[in-house]
Image (cartoon, rainbow, N blue to C red):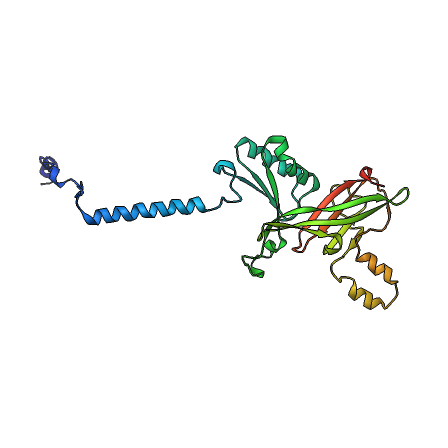
């Protein structure tokens, strides 16, 4: 029984005749009002979309001709280095991106200089975008549209003068602050800057605070009350001023000034002592 079933002749597969009338082809009725109304609505919708796109301003992150842009993000702990910026510039140029945005919590002076000279060097514009330290707080802070966690910022403007050889003196002239909401740049005078710090012998590695000033705030008020007149009033005026105390040149031959704006961004600039003005 099993052997006979094994060698039993198999039936050929069934064949069916193709009926072209059953093909899923749709023929539109040229006089169908519903079809004409639907096509008119689609055409109207396409025209409205095209009009909206024409009126929509170009994105500030879009390059010329709608080309893609590149982003470089700095480390969570530390400043953007010139090596990281250089690698970003090289890849941006190699892949034909229209713009390079360098984003970080802080940036080294040489890296900032490389960003500013990027367009002149390789033909690719670059912009440094300062990230607020609030980002590292995670969900501890409330996120709002007005938080301005990313912003374009300037550098402190300082004047370096000689105060009798071999002593020098630094004056904070001001600081430019960019408002991303109004898209306007507001120049702050030196006495309106919240805080600025001075390193009298910057070594390009670490910023060492030698002198610190708080022009706009009353940071020294509590200490002044606690000391109860132990120092003259001119001392406290100096600590809230824009002119540093005289200092001698260090072995590195350069200074660094760190300005802090109203959003807490730290803006660092370096000046050689040989650039001194009398």
Q: Residue 146 at what x, y percent from top left? A: 56, 57
30 sits to left or right of 147: left
Judge left or right: residue 21 versus residue 111: left
The N terminus - image quarter: top left
Residue 272 in percent (x, y) is at 79, 39
- Residue name at image x 81 percent, y 44 percent: 160
Q: Exactly how many numbered labels are in the figure?
A: 0
Quarter assignment of residue 102: top right
Q: Residue at x 60, y 31 (%)?
A: 122
Residue 190 showing in the rendered view: yes
* Percent position of residue 75, x then y: 62, 46
Image quarter of the C terminus: top right
Q: Residue furthest right?
A: 165
Residue 127 or residue 211, whichever sits in front:
127
Residue drawn at the location 67% of the way across and 40% of the way down: 112
The residue that appears at 17% across and 45% down in the rendered structure is 31
- 48 or 95: nearer the eye? 48
Taking the image as shown, residue 11 lies to the left or right of residue 190, namely: left
């Amino acid at each position: 029984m099993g052997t006979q079933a094994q060698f039993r002749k198999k039936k050929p597969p069934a064949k069916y005749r193709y009926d072209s009338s059953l093909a899923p082809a749709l023929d539109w009725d040229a006089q169908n009002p519903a079809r004409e109304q639907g096509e008119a609505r689609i055409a109207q919708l396409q025209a409205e979309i095209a009009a909206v796109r024409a009126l929509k301003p170009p994105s500030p992150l879009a390059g010329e001709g709608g080309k893609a842009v590149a982003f470089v993000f700095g480390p969570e702990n530390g400043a953007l280095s010139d090596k990281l910026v250089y690698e970003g510039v090289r890849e941006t140029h190699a892949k034909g991106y229209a713009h390079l945005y360098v984003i970080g919590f802080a940036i080294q002076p040489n890296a900032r200089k490389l960003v500013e000279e990027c367009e002149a060097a390789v033909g690719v514009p670059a912009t440094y975008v300062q990230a607020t330290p609030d980002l590292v707080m995670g969900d501890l802070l409330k996120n709002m549209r007005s938080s301005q966690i990313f912003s374009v910022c300037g550098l402190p403007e300082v004047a370096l003068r000689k105060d009798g050889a071999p002593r020098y003196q630094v004056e904070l002239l001001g600081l430019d602050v960019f408002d991303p909401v109004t898209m306007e740049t507001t120049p702050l005078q030196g006495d309106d800057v919240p805080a600025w710090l001075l390193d009298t012998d910057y070594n390009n590695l670490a910023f060492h605070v030698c002198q610190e000033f708080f022009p706009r705030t009353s940071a020294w008020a509590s200490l002044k009350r606690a000391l109860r007149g132990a120092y003259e009033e001119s001392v406290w005026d100096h600590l809230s001023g824009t002119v540093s105390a005289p200092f001698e040149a260090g072995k590195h031959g350069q200074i660094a000034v760190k300005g802090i704006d109203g959003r807490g961004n730290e803006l660092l600039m370096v000046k050689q002592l040989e650039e001194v003005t009398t």
